[in-house]
Amino acid sequence: MLTIGGGPLLYLAGVILFKRSIHGRLQLSHLVGIGALVVLMSFAHLLSPLVLSSVTTAILLGVAAWEAISLRSGPPVQSDATTA
């Protein structure tokens, strides 16, 4: 049970620390994903391994979708008018 939730939790923690070192800010999607996994792990003893892995996968898919949407709606790229 620990590896089903601990692996994705460790992955999200590593990614958020990496992106913080590169971009200098934390991503909300990853923080929410970490929080959701922590809450899920507190109920892990009540769930079957199949349900636990399915919910963990759904959380990771939600984090990935949120990140993709937030990166797509980022600030517009400025064009350099002097290179025309």
Image (cartoon, helix red, strand yellow):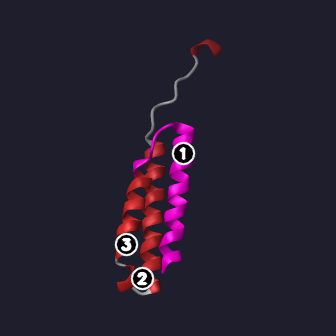
* Location of residue 11 with respect to 42 vertically, above or below: above
| Amino acid beneath label 3 | Leu
x and y percent of residue 81 in the render? 57, 15
The answer to whether marks 2 and 3 mark residues whose Cβ atoms lie closer than 8 Å is no
Q: Which residue is mark 1?
A: 19
Q: Which residues are magenta?
A: 1-28
x and y percent of residue 60 in the render? 47, 64
Residue drawn at 43 percent across, 46 percent down: 70
Find the distance from the CA under tag 1 to the CA under tag 2: 30 Å
Q: Is residue 84 visible?
A: no
Q: Earlier in the sequence, mark 1 or mark 2?
A: 1
Farthest bottom residue? 48
Q: Is residue 8 magenta?
A: yes
Q: Secondary structure at mark 2?
A: helix
Q: Secondary structure at mark 3?
A: helix
Specify few, some or many for label 3: CA neighbours under 10 Å numbering under 14, 14-19, or 20 or more. Answer: some
| Amino acid beneath label 2 | Val
| Apparent side of residue 25 relative to residue 21 in the rendered image (left or right) | left
Q: Is residue 76 magenta?
A: no
Q: Where residue 51 is drawn, which disc sits there?
A: 2
| Amino acid beneath label 1 | Lys
Q: Is residue 78 visible?
A: yes
Q: Which residue is mark 3?
A: 40
**Pick the front one: 63 or 34:** 34
Residue drawn at 51 percent across, 43 percent down: 20
| Apparent side of residue 11 relative to residue 41 in the rendered image (left or right) | right
Residue drawn at 65 percent across, 15 percent down: 83
Find the distance from the CA under tag 2 to the CA under tag 3: 11 Å
Q: Secondary structure at mark 1?
A: helix
Specify few, some or many for label 2: CA neighbours under 10 Å numbering under 14, 14-19, or 20 or more. Answer: few
x and y percent of residue 53 in the render? 47, 78
| Apparent side of residue 80 relative to residue 74 in the rendered image (left or right) | right
